[in-house]
Each structure stands twice: as structure tokens, then as C-alpha cells.
Image (cartoon, rainbow, N blue to C red):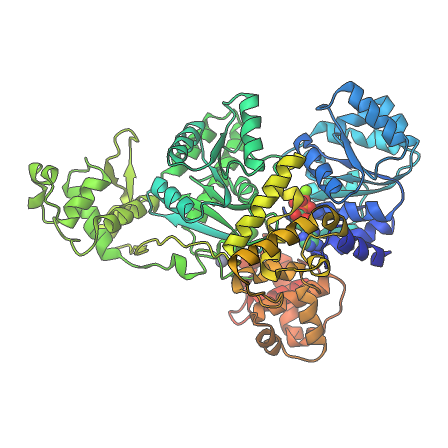
Amino acid sequence: MLTKAQHILQQYFGYSSFRPGQETMIKHALNGHHALAIMPTGGGKSLCYQIPGLVKEGCALIISPLISLMKDQVDALHAHDIPATFINSSISQAEQQKRLAQLQAGAYRFLYVAPERFESPEFMRTIQSIPLSLIAFDEAHCISQWGHDFRPSYRSIIPNLKRLPNLPVTLALTATATDEVIEDIQSILQIKVEHTVNTGYARENLHFHVVKGVDKKEFLLDFIKSRPKESGIIYTPTRKITDLIYQLLSEQGFQTAHYHAGMSESERQLAQHRFIEDEATIMVATNAFGMGIDKSNVRYVIHYALPMNMEAYYQEAGRAGRDGEPSDCYLLFAAQDIQLQRFLIEQSLLEPGKKEREYEKLQAMAHYGHTHRCLPRYILDYFGDLAGEESCGRCSNCSEEGKQEDRTREAQMILSCVKRMGERFGAQLTAKVLNGSKSQKVLELGFNKLTTYGLLSDYTEKDIMNWIHYLMADGYLSIQDPKFPTLQLTPLAYEVLKGNQTVSMRMSIEQKKNQVDVDEGLFDTLRHLRKQLAESKKLPPYVIFSDTSLKDMCRMIPETQQEMLQIKGMGEKKFEQYGTLFLQAIHQYIQDHGPIERQRPSVQTSSNKESKNMADQKPSYLVSYEAFQGGRTLSEIAEDRSLTVTTIKNHLFQAYKEGHSIDWTSFFDGETEKLILQKHEVLAEKKLKPLKECLPDEMTYSTIKAVLIKHALM
Ligand code: ADP
Ligand code: MG
Ligand code: ZN
């Protein structure tokens, strides 16, 4: 049956290999085991139920709390020529009746419903009388009262379900679940631990950046100018800032939409629609936006200020790159933003105990802005996900981008200048004084007589401004009243002046151009064709083809049907509908612009190595595993595959978790194993870092991880 699943993956969905976890979930479903999948956003949870739904006879019921997503999912299935529909409160009674009758007649392979539907006796009667292939709970964390998004109607389905004489296999899928929630889902849906698939939280195609010490508006404008055609979301902390940024970007001529809870329902729907249809490339929004947005080609998410906690941040940032293409997540960090969030917590109606907890979470979020560690590593540690690498090599702390130098001397000059100016002026005038400007205001106020006048005349006013912003971001300078942004020294600043504290800062922030790795003109042409088709079919563009498919066409330059069918996401049905049109467009483009060199699929640039691996023939970890079993050493495999030894080790760990055997002797000896297990046993907080700290230095993270993995402790 698995070969059948593999065949469907290729034929209907146009993918050549499964993503981590998919195959195991499908296997459980086909063997009739209730199963739970915890996979990150964009990890490919839908296929976990869509493929078994196609292998088995009957109709699959998909329960989803997000009405707005149902239509998209159904559209996507239709694009593959799979009969599907949804029934929810957004359609008329008459239409509901019609669809129920069709369901009875066996017209659908998939039916999406909201949990409330199970309260309707008529619906219950209908589903009892037809063959069901499976029931899937999407967003399954909503079923648990411990989840952050508990829906009582979700839980009350269970007694109704249990009465079904034809109850099929049940699958639950979620991207966010704490241990408590996982246990809750397992017990409610009677899912065994061994039928739970957890691939962790890591999103390898996302590049995380923290940006400090910039003028945020200027940063946004520069950034968007460098990537004008890409779809992105800008999250702001308040409605007011949303309006402000929306206005700023619209005035500059960017196709922008905005969204917050203060707008009317119809305004919000229109904004969402424009963004999803690629009419607006940029969405500026508060955290009210996003629930139920499945747009796969969001290339960046920028947080204009600190969000309230890590859970919110990762969920919002995670809306980038669902299609697996490299995407960026920026946090524009400034220490004073913490105060706004503190204020919001203070004003909330939470009980005192809960407020305390929220303050703690905010603190962890603020640390993210200051940390020098690898950013995704910091995030994964926060969620207790110990798998994966110690450093990603891509985030702003791991790469050159965030490289800082000791700038204590310059910081002292700036701070003492602020002090000498009486802590009554803003960043701009301070920069002028330090730069030795002869502007009228400087001379009028007599600041040219200060000892700090002209101390930084070797730098530009802009460099000095950036440093001042940086000193604000890191809490050396503060602004008491936002209406009069005058700089003041904080207690931390005095430590710097006294020489007790050093300051590292970045010289300047150059805007990194997005590395477009395909012929941009062709990509544009195909995007345009997709948009036209989408309009005529009234579908979101990414339902026709994802960005990944279009980029793949630009890399492979297919000329025949055979070649076109090799493109990621090009199933046979999709080819029938759109293949020829795209072949013609590519052909025409080459006629007009001359030939384009084909990239062989095996050529991988470092920026998309990870995301490609996910979709290549054999999962990357198995390639490493087989080499290891074949007798090659870790460093030889790393060399062969241009990957790090750490990555190879992680591959082997994954293989072990998937049920392959490993000879552990090359990882640790018996003594080491015993010691690590002993320490682990007594540790209160079972995380990698505290464990490492109570072990001898020579025991590396990899060794510790290996022991824990061998004993299924992580
Ligand atoms: P989730 O529900 O887990 O957030 P989706 O099911 O919406 O994710 O899938 C995200 C994207 O990944 C979709 O565009 C989907 O077509 C794509 N995808 C799913 N499985 C695979 C696979 N095996 N190979 C390549 N792409 C895949
Ligand atoms: Mg999903
Ligand atoms: Zn990193």
C-alpha cells in the first residue's frame, strides 16, 4: 500500500519524496492505527491525511476550526482534480442540503467541516450511512484545554463520534503542542505513544535576523525597495502603528494592504483578499492578522517591534516560507519596546498569577533580542526541542551580518556628549555635535564649545545616528517621553562611562539583496501567467502553482511534457490543466530573450541546500546513514556531502529515531554513557544546556545528545 502512496505523491501532487514524518503517518493510517503528527508549519501535514484518504475507499472527513482555510484546501484538491467540498456556516442552507445529498451519493473523497457540524443530527445521519476512509483533526491542539487555542466545540465532538458505527481511523495534526497538550490529545483520541510522530519545530528554510540600532522606518523602506516584488508581512504592536506604516508605504507607491481589529469586517476581508491574491505584495498588520492564512509564498515576515512572547513570535514569523523556499524573519529590536509590551500586560484583565507568567515570557522574548547565540537554536531551546544543530550558520548571530566590534570608546564619547548636552536633546542634534557640525542650532546653543564637539568627525552623521539607536536598543540610552524624544542616560550607561562595561556594535548595516537564484525575467513572466490564470479561475495564485514550482521551471527550463512532469508540484492533472500554457510561455521567453542555461537539480547553492534536501529523491539523512553503514567515517561523509560533521551526526540520530539501528561505539564509551544517564536522571530541568554544564567539558553536545537519543530521552 505504501507503494501506492508513493505513486499518488508523484502522480497527483507531483512530489518525488516524502518530507520527514509524512511516510510514518501515512503508514499508521493505512494500518488502521489512530495517529498524531506534530510537524512545523509548512511541514506538509495535509498530505498526511490526503494520501491515505486517496488510497482508502470512501470519503475522508477533515475537521478544521478555520473556516477561511477550508475553501483554499478544497480549491487545492480541485486543482489536482480530486472531488472535495466543505460544509460550514459560510454557505446557504440550500447549498448545505445540496452538498449533503452529494455526499450521500458518494460524490466526494474529502469533506471539510467545522466541529459544530457534528451537532447536527442530519449531518450525523448522513455520515453514518456512507463509507468513511478516515477522520482527521487539523489544528488538533484546539481539542485540548491546555492548548493556547482551546475550542470547546472541538472536544464535544468526541462523544458524538464514538457513537458512529462506522468509525474509521482517526488522525490528529498540529504544529504547536506542549507535552501536556500532546498527552491530552493522545488520551482523548486514544492514540498510542508509538503512533505519535514528532518531527520537532525546526524550520530550516527560515533565516532569522535581529536588527538593532536602525531607524526602523528607514530600514523598512530600504528593505522593501531591495525586494519589491516579494510578498511579505509586517507585524506591528498596535493599530496606530499599523495605520502609520501602512500610510508610509502606500505613499511611497508600494502595493500595501493593512489589517487590524479596529477595521470593519468587510475592510478586513478585502485587505486579506488583496494580499492572498498577490494584488498587494505587503501586508501591514497587528497580530489580529494571520489565523487561517495559508499563503505559501510569503518571503519575509518583519516584526516592527518586540511581540509579547516567543509563542506568538514563532507562530507569526512562521508564516514565512510555507512552500519551503528560503525566507527571512526579521525582528527590529529596541529595548524601549519592552515597555510597551509590559504596559499591555499590565492593562490586561489577567489574574495576578497569570500576569507574572506573562512577564516571564516577555523577558524570554526580550533576551532573544539581546542574545549572541544562534537565533533558531535559542527558539528551539525555548520550546524544549533539543534536536538539531547547535548553530544554524544562517541567522544574523551565526553569520557575518551580525558581526560586532568593540566600540566602547565611541559609546563613551556618545554617552558623555548626551550628558554634557544636559539630556535635553534628540539623536539628530547629538550626532551633529559629535560630528562637529557647524549648523546654526549647534552654534546657537554653544555646543561647539563642548569638549565632546567633533570627537567623532571621522564618521558620518548617519553612522553616529546608527550607534545612538544601537545604544537605545541595548538599553544604554532611554527616551522617557515619546512625544519629546530626548536622550537620557540609564544606570547601565554610567557603567560604560566608568569603564566597567564594554560595548560591541556593528559598523553599519548594509541591506542584503535577496539572492535570486533564477532568471528573474522568466520568473516574472511565469508569475504573470499564473496571476492571469488565477484571476480567470477565481483561485489564489499559489493554488495553481507554488513559487517553488515556478522557480523549479526557471531552473530546469522544461521543453517537453516529460520534462515538465519532473517539476516539483507538477502532477498529471496539473499538467493537463496548465502544463502546456507554461511550456509555451517558457518557449516564447527563450525565443525573445535567448537561451537560459539549465541548472541541474544536483547543483545546490548553500542558501537553498536544506530546502532542496527535503524534496530530493532520498531523504538526506538516509543518504548519510547508508554511507555510515557502508563503513565511511563521519568526517568522510561530511566531506563527501559538503555538510558539517554535526549535521551528519544529526542525520544518523534521525535515522535511529526512524527505526534504523546504529553502532554507538563511535559516539561514546560505556563510562561516558553511564555518567550522562546518571546526571540526566537527577536533573530538574531536562534540557541540554544545564546537562552539559554539570558534565566534564570534554563531553560535547553531540556526545550527550547521542546518549539521550539512544535511550529515547529526546
Ligand atoms: P502544514 O499544514 O503542515 O502547515 P501544508 O500541508 O499546507 O503544511 O504543506 C505546505 C507546503 O508543502 C504545501 O505547498 C505542500 O504542497 C508542500 N509539500 C507537502 N508535502 C511535500 C513533499 N513531500 N514534497 C514537497 N512539497 C511538499
Ligand atoms: Mg495545515
Ligand atoms: Zn544561527
Instruction: State the residue at coordinates (72%, 34%).
Output: 64
Residue furthest toward the front? 591
Check the picture and name the quadrant holding the C terminus. Answer: bottom right
Taking depth in this image into account, of 270 and 497 the one nearest to the observer is 270
Check the picture and name the quadrant holding the N terminus. Answer: bottom right
Q: Is residue 61 left or right of residue 469?
A: right
Q: Position of residue 461 (x, y in %)?
A: 21, 48
Work out whether residue 14 can be spotted. yes
Instruction: State the residue at coordinates (80%, 53%).
Output: 8
Q: Quadrant of residue 692?
A: bottom right
Taking depth in this image into account, of 177 and 322 the one nearest to the observer is 322
Q: Position of residue 319 (x, y in %)?
A: 57, 43
Taking depth in this image into account, of 136 and 421 the one nearest to the observer is 136
Q: Position of residue 230 (x, y in %)?
A: 50, 46
Instruction: State the residue at coordinates (46%, 25%).
Output: 347
Q: Is residue 82 left or right of residue 637?
A: right
For residue 353, above or below residue 30: above
For residue 443, above or below residue 387: above
Instruction: State the residue at coordinates (71%, 38%).
Output: 75
Work out whether residue 178 can be spotted. no
Report how many numbered discs are placed on residues in the image.
0
Q: Quadrant of residue 182?
A: top right
Q: Position of residue 331 (x, y in %)?
A: 44, 45
Taking depth in this image into account, of 105 and 489 the one nearest to the observer is 105
